[in-house]
């Protein structure tokens, strides 16, 4: 199918064409990026912990989630001797 059409369709419209068996290759450029699924986990810190996380996040100018991820990564690495990665200095 020639790529002469400048009409942009929504993802739902393209999906509809695909379901009808129409050629939708003109809507793709061949440069796809794989997206890993997000795994979520809830954390309920104690009030003092939440306050400390907030203070650290503010001091480092990063999100609380980033602080939690960094601390969790550090804790998990401590349990794996010989697998420590060099720490990146933040802030």
Image (cartoon, rainbow, N blue to C red):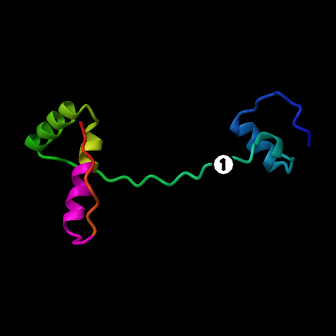
Q: Residue at x 12, y 36 (%)?
A: 51
Q: Quadrant of residue 58?
A: top left
Left or right placement of residue 6 versus residue 60 in this view: right
Q: Residue furthest left?
A: 48
Q: Residue furthest right?
A: 2
- Considering only vertical position in the picture, is 64 above or below 7? below
**Quadrant occupied by the C terminus:** top left
Q: Residue furthest top?
A: 6
Q: Please rate how many residues cluster around mark 1, counting C-alpha atoms within 10 Å: few if below 14, some from 14 to 19, many from 20.
A: few
> What residue is pinned by disc 1?
32
Left or right placement of residue 62 versus residue 59 in this view: right
Q: Where residue 59 appears, x then y in whole percent?
A: 18, 32
- Considering only vertical position in the picture, is 30 above or below 82? above
Q: Where residue 1 appears, x then y in whole percent?
A: 91, 43
Nearer to us in this view, 67 or 39? 67
**Over which residues does the magenta segment extend?**
70-82
Number of numbered discs overlaid on the protein picture: 1
Secondary element type, mark 1: loop
Q: Residue at x 10, y 41 (%)?
A: 47
Q: Main secondary structure of the magenta part?
A: helix
As for residue 11 lying within the magenta part, the answer is no
Q: Residue at x 55, y 51 (%)?
A: 35
Left or right placement of residue 37 versus residue 71 in this view: right
Q: Residue at x 84, y 48 (%)?
A: 20
Left or right placement of residue 1 versus residue 18 in this view: right
Q: Where residue 31 appears, x then y in whole percent?
A: 69, 46
């Amino acid at each position: 199918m020639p790529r002469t059409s400048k009409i942009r369709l929504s993802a739902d419209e393209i999906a509809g064409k695909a379901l009808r068996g129409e050629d939708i290759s003109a809507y793709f450029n061949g440069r796809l990026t794989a997206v890993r699924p997000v795994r979520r986990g809830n954390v309920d810190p104690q009030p003092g912990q939440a306050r400390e996380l907030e203070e650290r996040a503010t001091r480092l100018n990063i999100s609380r989630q980033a602080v939690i991820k960094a601390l969790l990564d550090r804790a998990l690495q401590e349990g794996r001797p010989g697998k420590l990665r060099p720490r990146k200095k933040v802030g």
